[in-house]
Amino acid sequence: MNPQANSTILSFEALRDFIEAALSSQGLPQADAYKVATLMAEADMQGSDGHGVIRLPMYIKRIQAGGINKNPVIKVVHERAAMAVVDGDNGMGHLVVSHAVDLAIEKARQCGVAWVSTRFSNHAGPASLYARKPLQHDMLGLYFAVGNANHLPPWGGMDMLLSTNPIAAGIPTADEPPVVLDMATTVAAYGKVKAKAKRGEMMPEGWMIDRQGKPLTDPKRAEEGFLLPIGEHKGYGLALIVGLLAGTLGGAAMGREVVDFNADHVTVTNTGQAILVIDLSAFGDPAVFKHAVDALVKDIRGSEKLPGVDRIWLPGEQSHERRQRYQSGGIPIVNALVTELQSLARELGIAPLI
Amino acid sequence: MNPQANSTILSFEALRDFIEAALSSQGLPQADAYKVATLMAEADMQGSDGHGVIRLPMYIKRIQAGGINKNPVIKVVHERAAMAVVDGDNGMGHLVVSHAVDLAIEKARQCGVAWVSTRFSNHAGPASLYARKPLQHDMLGLYFAVGNANHLPPWGGMDMLLSTNPIAAGIPTADEPPVVLDMATTVAAYGKVKAKAKRGEMMPEGWMIDRQGKPLTDPKRAEEGFLLPIGEHKGYGLALIVGLLAGTLGGAAMGREVVDFNADHVTVTNTGQAILVIDLSAFGDPAVFKHAVDALVKDIRGSEKLPGVDRIWLPGEQSHERRQRYQSGGIPIVNALVTELQSLARELGIAPLI
């Protein structure tokens, strides 16, 4: 089970430069291509490999099909002191959300707390990238997004009106790794189902059900069933609330309006995200907060363990360790993906990845 | 399974007046007693019967033991345009949180969004009461609280460092009942375990585990085990983040600092809650938002159903129906509790409940 078996090790810079070249070749302005490439390579570097360079071929397909605005005018359409709605003009999601988070940080510095919603955004990679961004300012981030394909019905139903709508949170610490939660509101993200199918493995019971309400464990039959929410009706409720906050509130798509961006490369997705930024210094001395989190982290890590448990992890701790390891030792990219990227390079006429 | 069997039907007013008299008899100022009594009776009226008048004997016990400040000076200790930290001075939680929510509504009207944290608060009843409060102002509420007893260990651990830390959300609608989510981050709240024990019933697998990690289904053995979080490590992560937001951020108790208020009636609990209020009018025309939510609600309710499912519910819809039914027809209070309240009335020298 060596995660680096069948993989090629690449440096962060090599990965970023390749993505940048690919996006530039399609007419994205160089500064924008660099920004998106950096965030995508950061996703791979923290082990969010379902949201990093693996998405490049699909992004390129969408750009080529005219489904992305290569020169968006990202602008604020509603604003008050502690909030804004940012219209992404159908640009790359990474650019739109980065814009939103930067604005929220600036507003939180003034008001203590700020909320920025996006509309006409697109898929932006892993939620944790954006929830983490306020950390360097001694601020706390909470991030909500509408997933880009509906695989979740309401509890008891069969119409897939909801997505895996994730919640992410980034909490500053003093000496410990930051506490970073990034979770879909379904038991498994749909990407995990596709990965099981690729590897020819069965899914555990509890990930999906079929149209009879029976467990569906063969990932090749995924189209015949639905994802299950965490905690049954509770996860359904959470997915709904996250969608209302990240989508409906900002005027973005939700429910039946959500475009399945795996199947449709042309229709404007009107993706919505929302970021809440909280400036610790408004609540007292940030050092007091951060040391309190550190103490809690140590208590949790030091908890007596259940039989058979080696270690108790904090949310974000495994990503943190991976980021440090990959930063110095390079990022493993599975060979099947490397091959796909090499053929993409030939197609786009850019330098190969390796 | 008639929920009104073995129950006595009481009007909202009778219940409220009884609670008010009980609290007044212990020296709470009359306006405060009335406010707390109204919120407690509202809890019963929406069917949150684990958080209504059932808590009165314990509140009285805590007041008599000196564990509650009957004349608190509730004040803002940190403030910026879109946030505040409210110190509840160890007053009744209902008073402290009401104060916080009113302040957040006022600030959201100016800034579009506002966050208010509490410290030195106490148990305040069901989370949904407070998440619902902004609705009448065409505002949206998100509420987080630290539970008042730790029954949840970190995932893989046995030290009960976390509570059922609930999340609640109130989302305005046009003609539909508001969407109101109120959920513990554990599969079952601890009150449900105690109710099973009282009725001599077994718990389903998945609610609790014992110290071997095996399912614990006998609620009489609850002390030997722990609650399980929803979605395994995900619910653990959520409970932790909710606790950091509702507790640590505002300077309230979290982790090992949490006082078990069922066992200890004297120690200051330093309970923390947090409310986020979002003013719809800052995001565009509130009517557009509310009609979009209505349309989504109708799509969800009208979804094709799984075999054996009668009806698809929206979060908060069952409470809404119950509230309307109990408002006109009265609130059923189980007779065992009525007996307990009658003996409390004699003890306090106030008029009996019936």
Image (tube, coloured by chain):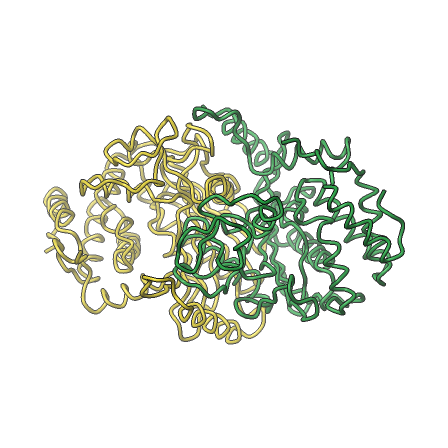
Chain colours: A yellow, B green
Residue placed most toward the observer, B167 or B52: B52
Residue B26 image point, x, y percent: 84, 62
Question: Measuring 43% from the left and 60% from the top, which residue is drawn there?
Answer: B211
Residue closest to the eye, A166 or B13: B13
Q: Nearer the viewer, residue B354 or A17?
A: B354
How many numbered marks are there? 0
Quadrant for the N terminus of chain A in the image: bottom left
**Does residue B263 appear left or right of residue B38 in this picture?**
left
Image location (x, y in percent) of residue B128: 63, 46
Task: Give left or right: position of A36 versus B322.
Answer: left
B35 relative to A291, above or below:
above
Is residue A75 visible in this depiction of the protein? Answer: no
Q: Measured along the vertical axis of the image, is residue B127 above or below residue B266? A: above
Residue at (18, 40) in percent of width and height: A200
Specify whether B64 is left or right of B166.
right
The x, y position of residue A211, in whole percent, is 37, 26
**Residue at the spot 45% in from the left edge and 29% down from the top edge:** A157
The answer to whether B112 appears left or right of B92 in the picture is left
The quadrant of the picture occupied by the C terminus of chain A is bottom left
Residue B258 shows in the view: yes
Can you give x and y, in whole percent of width and height, for residue B162 in the image?
51, 61
